[in-house]
Image (cartoon, helix red, strand yellow):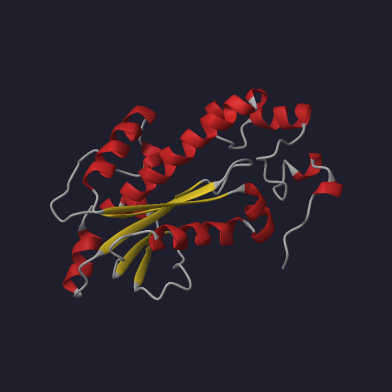
Amino acid sequence: MRAFEKKAVEKGFSIIAGVDEAGRGPLAGPVVSAAVILPDSFSDPDIDDSKKLSPKKRERLFDTIRAHALSVGVSIVGPDEIDRINIFQASLRTMLLAVRQLTPQPDYLLVDGKFPIPALGIPQEPIIKGDSLSLSIASASIIAKVTRDRLMADYDAAWPQYGFAQHKGYPTKAHREAIREFGPCPIHRRSFKGVREYADPLNFRWPQP
């Protein structure tokens, strides 16, 4: 899990951050990104892609990473912004803002996925399935996922009829049926199929090209 970090060090970089996001696919809630700089001495064999871990293990690792990381940045972009600029651009924006929170600023980024983060001016390496291949990215995925899950649990208390605590806003059968029955609530993404059909067109602005 440290192969990409070691390769970056061999290239002459010394402050390496992993970056990942959570929440691109849901019909409701924010997209959350995290950026994590780990010390060279840090290791935990349980750290992996957050989607492969149980909620209990994610919570434990969240605390471990927070306790040992040199720096952690977290950024949240809500559904209104997602609808305005689209989910792809919103995901990149949260990544950029998460990196900018880091102190010290990294001199190299390992980014989950196919695309680099624009407008940063920091050398970076996009890695497909990086959350399963890089310790830094996997750590960022855990921070992002736990942060978002906690937010969705809070939203569940405000709008219990949708079941956000269970599905976290993802398009499960139960969630789709709740949208059909109750209509969208303020945290639903009104540009997404499965929501826009039930949204009030008089109160919705379509994303700008």
Residue at image location 63% in from the left, 23% down from the top: 160
Farthest right residue in view = 202
Relative to residue 201, is residue 49 drawn left or right?
left
The reply to whether residue 199 is in sight is yes
Q: Where is residue 175 in the image (x, y as percent from the top left)?
A: 65, 30
Looking at the image, which residue is at 72% across and 60% down? 207
- Give the quadrant of residue 95: bottom left
Q: Position of residue 198 (x, y in %)?
A: 80, 39
> Where does the C terminus fall, quadrant-wise?
bottom right
Q: How many marks?
A: 0
Relative to 61, 45 lies left or right: left
Answer left or right for 125 relative to 75: left
**138 or 99, nearer to the observer:** 99
Q: Whole-percent x and y of residue 174?
A: 65, 26
Q: Residue at x 49, y 57 (%)?
A: 94
Q: In this view, does 160 lie above or below 106?
A: above
Left or right, residue 118 beside residue 208: left
Whole-percent x and y of residue 29? Answer: 59, 41
* Residue 163 appears anywhere in the view: no
Q: Residue at x 34, y 59 (%)?
A: 102
